[in-house]
Image (cartoon, helix red, strand yellow):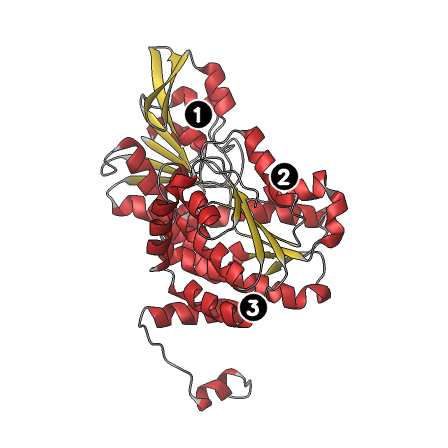
Amino acid sequence: MDYDVADLDLAPLGKQRVDWASRNMPVLASIRERFEKERPLEGKRIAACLHITTETANLLKTLKAGGAEVVACASNPLSTQDDVAATLVKDDEIATFAIKGENSEVYYKHMDSVLDTHPQITMDDGCDLVSRLHQQRPEQLKNMIAGTEETTTGVIRLRAMEADNALHYPIVAVNDANTKHLFDNRHGTGQSTLDGIIRATNILLAGKCVVVAGYGFCGKGVSNRARGMGAQVVVCEVDPLRALEAVMDGFRVEEMAEAAKEGDIFITVTGDRDVLRKEHFEVMKNGAILANSGHFDIEIDLKALAKMSISTKEVRPLVQEFEIPDSQGSHQVLVIAEGRLVNLAAAEGHPAAVMDMSFANQALGVEWLVKNAESLDNIVLGVPQDIDQEIARLKLETMNVSIDKLTESQIEYLSSWTVGT
């Protein structure tokens, strides 16, 4: 088995941590138990380009239990947990190509190593694997069955491919499942983003002005948790409906040009590029902290920041200080984790309890695709509602939460139109 990880000797620690995560992933565990019996993915080769974390390891083990041949690489150069990569290779015999801190050349080399196995199914997080397959290896597309996509940024890119008639096999947008974005994006990103910032800086959030760029589900989670820790939160948006929602939720909404002068901490969660740029850096407070929780490291224009700075230095692990000249002399701007996903680069990512639902969607989505791919068009698809509902039901069951059921008369009323006041 080919692989490329930092250190196989880290496997015992990785196994211990993967097992710990599994304690908080009961829905995925129940799927794995069924997969072991039914083997619905027998003989299928799955290429998974995901964050190599303890939670992801439990997903990959579930896919293998279902009969799939699984190979994995990292979907972000800084998100890999090296001990997890080691245990996947050594204990689970899952070919893994991922090293924390790998440069761009190695990042794409690892992706190519995964594609060299000629997978039939892709499981992507950000659409880099799918994009590379379509652009660099079009000859392999004829063997593809289907794929899944984990995150908002990837779905945006896939919809652009679909609009250009460039997508050559059906892909399920796992990100759009209610049991994914309502919980993973909001509760997972909300908690883990602040966890990464605090771990990297040891800063007190209470009393600080936190500027959140983007008020999608991730932005909602970050904003609410920052407020819950005593921060004054300002939201920046381009969508009028989301901006209005933020106002009605009690947040101050401003243009970034104004917020840039006030913020102590800036958090980008938009999925777009150059959200924080030169004109913003110029007016920021001395010591302003910049962090990104969007998928790619382009939300903060780091090239412009580096170009305008007179010096840079690392002041803490994963914290780089940029000194910018101004009319008073200079001021410093601090960037966490090179502008990459702060919750994974500076912390451990989402709690396992929310990834339980996200990865249950991945596992059941792949099973559904294997059964139905021949009848599907080459488009971006939603997770079937019955899968979404079943995951919610299973999650409630594992939490010992009971809900009501409709009576026969209620069901009849909801399906009728003749009964009025």
Relative image position of residue 75 (x, y in whole percent): 52, 42
Label 1 to label 2, Cα distance in Å? 38 Å
Q: Which residue carries the number 3 mark?
A: 39
Q: Is residue 136 left or right of residue 65?
A: right
Pick the front one: 9 or 409: 9
Question: The residue tagged with tag 3: helix, strand or loop?
Answer: loop
Residues packed near mark 3 inside 10 Å, few (<14), some (14 to 19) or many (20 plus): some
Q: Is residue 55 left or right of residue 94?
A: left
Q: Which residue carries the number 1 mark?
A: 280
Label 3 to label 2, Cα distance in Å? 28 Å
Q: Which residue carries the number 2 mark?
A: 112
328 up-or-down from 347: above or below = above
Label 1 to label 3, Cα distance in Å? 54 Å
What residue is shown at x 47% (from left), y 45% (from top)? 51
Question: The residue tagged with tag 2: helix, strand or loop?
Answer: helix
Pick the front one: 313 or 85: 85
Amino acid type, mark 2: Asp
What residue is shown at x 45% (from left), y 62% (from top)? 179
Amino acid type, mark 1: His
256 up-or-down from 379: above or below = above
Closer to the N terminus: mark 1 or mark 3? Answer: 3
Residues packed near mark 1 inside 10 Å, few (<14), some (14 to 19) or many (20 plus): some
Amino acid type, mark 3: Arg
